[in-house]
Amino acid sequence: MIPMKTESAWRGTADCKACGIRDLVLFADLNAHDFGLIHAPIDEMEYAAGASMFTEGSAAKGIFTLRHGMVKLVRSTLDGRPRIVRVLRAGDVVGLEALASAKYDCDAVTLTAASVCRIPLEVIHKLSSSSPRLHAQLMKKWQHALKDADDWLADMNFGTAKRRVGNLVLKMRSAANSEVSMLFSREDMGAMLDLKLETVSREISRLVREGAIEQLDKQGRIYRVIYPDSLASD
């Protein structure tokens, strides 16, 4: 898959100062002088669900701030199986590791339709060296990414199948409404939790049957969380 809209790629269509989620992303604390240092283009891009943003080991030319949608980060195990190591949502930075290695550590694939801002590495490096405000934001993002990775490892890869699925439902609750959890395909959930697709389907069905969650759509991707305490227990 390729981005849905790439006509403006690298021509600088983003208006960072007027960004609706600016407080969530890298440029939250920048002032007018900082924005004056940005000379390379920053572009808004849109991806369809299932589109590849970049692949593991590929050379990085930029990082992405996620404005809308969800992105999965995927790595292959030694036996070739795909494992989802994290899920990113609005406000997260995709490809942050490129600032240290100039290569991407994972495959980044959209779970839903997504809109992003693509920022050239030269912009980040220049601002990081000249703006203490951006440097502080980068450190916050690094810290958040490390903590999030540790949380995913602890919550999604240990315990019974019931506990893993329950933790995922809780983790995928909406920031705007904690009663609503947005999931994705059972195959993706299995790849994240190291469970078989059938096991994931069985556990979701059990949660619905027991009344812990309620399905809100025909596709089985959106659920109302009714009894969150029961999801966090074995």
Image (cartoon, rainbow, N blue to C red):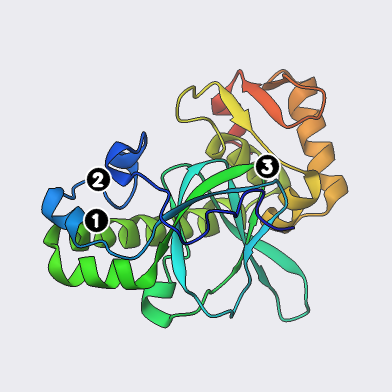
Is mark 2 in CB contact (under 8 Å) with mark 3? no
Q: CA distance from mark 1 to mark 3?
A: 33 Å
Q: Earlier in the sequence, mark 2 or mark 1?
A: 2
Q: Which residue is mark 1?
A: 137
Q: Nearer the viewer, mark 2 or mark 1?
A: 2
Residue most toward the right?
A: 198
Q: CA distance from mark 2 to mark 1?
A: 8 Å
Residue positioned 69% across, 27% down in the render: 222
Q: Which residue is mark 3?
A: 165
Could you say which disc has been placed on residue 28 in the image?
2
Is mark 2 in CB contact (under 8 Å) with mark 1? yes
Q: Nearer the viewer, residue 213 or 182?
A: 182
When the figure is inspected, residue 134 is found, relative to residue 56, above or below; the finding is above
Q: Looking at the picture, how far across and down is residue 206, in whole percent? A: 79, 29
Mark 2 Cα within 10 Å, few/some/many (few <14, many 20+)?
A: some
Q: Inspect the image, locate mark 2, and give the three-letter code of the amino acid beneath it.
A: Ala
Residue positioned 54% across, 59% down in the render: 153
Residue 146 sits in which quadrant? bottom left
